Amino acid sequence: MTVSDVRKRYLDFFAKREHVVIPSAPIVPENDPTTLFTSSGMQPLVPYLLGQSHPEGARLADSQMSFRAEDIEEVGDNRHTTFFEMLGNWSLGDYFKQEQLPWFYEFLTNKEEGLGLDANKLYVTTFAGDEESGMPADTEAVEIWKKIGIADDHIFSYGAKKNWWSRAGVPAKMPVGEIGGPDSEVFYDFGLPHDPTFGAECHPNCDCGRFVEIGNSVFMQFIKKEDPSTGSGQAAFKELPKKNVDFGGGLERLVAATQNDSDIFMIDVFDAARTVLESRSGMRYKDVVRHTSDVGRTTSYMRSFRIILDHMRAASFMLASGIRPGNTEQGYVLRRLIRRSLREADKLGIKDAVLAEVAGGFGDAYRDHYAFIYESAEIIKSELEKEEAQFRKTLTHGMHELEKMGNSIDAFTLFTTYGFPVELTEEIAKEKGIALDMTAVQAKMEGHQALSRAGAAQKFAGGLADTAEQTVRYHTAHHLLLKALQLVLGHDVHQRGSNITSERLRIDFSWSAKMTDEQKAAVEKIVNEQIAAGLPVVRTDMNKEEAEKLGAEHEFGATYPDIVSVYSVGPLDNAFSIEFCGGPHVGNTSELGEDGKQFKILKEEASSAGIRRIKAVLE
């Protein structure tokens, strides 16, 4: 099956079981400064899993664009990627284990509605219990799997590090008030020979490449509370009155399972890009794989193919989402993907510009579900060509700095300061007869990477998206600002990103020229007039087609279900602005002007090519 086939079958399967199919959130989270990227299917839904009511109800399903920068060093084996789609279904206090596990099994094995996988190739894992916290084993999940028909020797139980979920980790580390619960994973057995370097015996959580996780059902079942019976402030786990299900399944891995091919880089979305690399390198990817003893452990050439394929897909989605290469945050990650790809292209013997051509295949591959990739083809091509040329200059500059170092070559400084690849430094040093202490360099690099990962983890651990009163006001002001920009600059202006906190709002929008003082003043005037007008802010659920006919603004690149929610500033039949939006918002624009506050633009500047950025406040 293709990626489109599996995605559609999954969403249709759960739609038939009364789930509302919701659109993927953007790859860059809106209104959440705590994380750089949307890295899982559950991330946009955390507030609802913690108790908020979702506007679409208690049963939800989607396919979420996701990116995990921490996985960048893992790319190169048969199953890891930085960008991926996570299929998800959720029960917010509705159904639980008795429904979830049989449904997922049915989706995997049913030939008519699902994927028709061989049930004998499925293995499952459950929670074995945790002695430190006294949490018992999840015997209920084991019994359900047995009743479904999973054989005893295909059911494995692991401790809290493998089969328990909470934001804090294992049960003992959960603070009072934290929720968590056991999970149950499903693995597909690709039948590869076991590599004993990963242990004497193979099992679902073995890393040899034989077993690949294709889905995980998390059962948010418990809350940690103080136990007054002990009189010592100790905590105990209590059952939640409303239990949630959070399922996530890797779309690409599921497609690979339908093909019984453990190499996810052989699925259809990589076909065009892989063909370009074969043509430009003179190597056939299948031949490279065939001459490898174990597909889970790669040759350098195979690793290079996979890194370029993964990184260019991720870069295409980022560029189409408005991210541009830079030296900070998302822009830095994008630049790193591009530069790593160039280094791997060099290893394949490709010395001329190639990345734009590789990325060109992803537009058609995702055209049916993510049309914004196809529509952004020229932007993607232009930015990759520009970045590739710039990095070639970086290499030239790095070579100059290396020559200046003489025999005291500092590979770590060349990499962190000038972006000069460590591998290339080692090769040039060998040519000079200089033996670098690569162990020390590697230790420095690992320390550098650990700090980066810790920073990224800390950024995500910041918690939920802020829904404080002032943040909600800025969200509504954001809607007013976008409409005002369109009235002043023209209707070609569209949102390309936002970040809203309780201290200010920020909007990125499509516009190529610096705004004049007169234009900024006109925008401020329009926004403040709408605040003074005391317009109601109204939410309406309607057919997507109807909302589009009304001219409702929507997120760039997002896909939407048949029924959508829109917020109008003013009555729907005479609104100042209308946008696809899930909220929250104030009830009336007059709330933005309480205590005499006025809308004010603090700064207007370039964000990237063709994208401007405004920061504004209510003061």
Image (tube, rainbow, N blue to C red):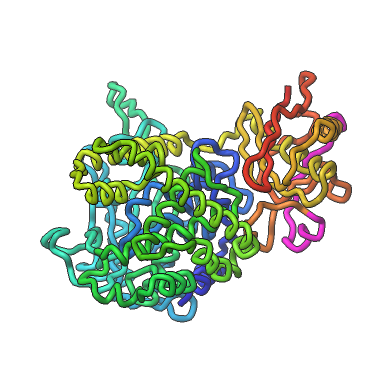
The image quadrant that residue 148 belongs to is bottom left
Identify the residue at the far bottom of this view. Answer: 112
Q: Is residue 541 magenta?
A: yes
Q: Is residue 90 left or right of residue 487?
A: left
Q: Number of numbered discs present?
A: 0
Identify the residue at the far left of this view. Answer: 200
Point 22% across, 49% down: residue: 430
Report x, y in % for residue 510. 71, 48
The image quadrant that residue 413 belongs to is top left
Q: Is residue 340 left or right of residue 554?
A: left
Q: Quadrant of the N terminus?
A: bottom left
Report x, y in % for residue 71. 37, 51
Point 85% across, 29% down: residue: 532
Q: Quadrant of the C terminus?
A: top right
Report x, y in % for residue 488. 84, 41
Whether residue 14 is visible to the viewer of this picture, yes or no, is no
Q: Nearer the viewer, residue 198 or 189?
A: 198
Report x, y in % for residue 570. 84, 42
Q: Is residue 606 left or right of residue 526?
A: left
Is residue 256 positioned above or below 499 on the image?
Answer: below
The image quadrant that residue 103 belongs to is bottom left
Q: Nearer the viewer, residue 82 or 117?
A: 82
Q: Which residues are magenta?
A: 532-551
Q: Is residue 129 magenta?
A: no
Q: Is residue 226 left or right of residue 519?
A: left
Whether residue 386 is visible to the viewer of this picture, yes or no, is yes
Is residue 95 positioned above or below 168 on the image?
Answer: below
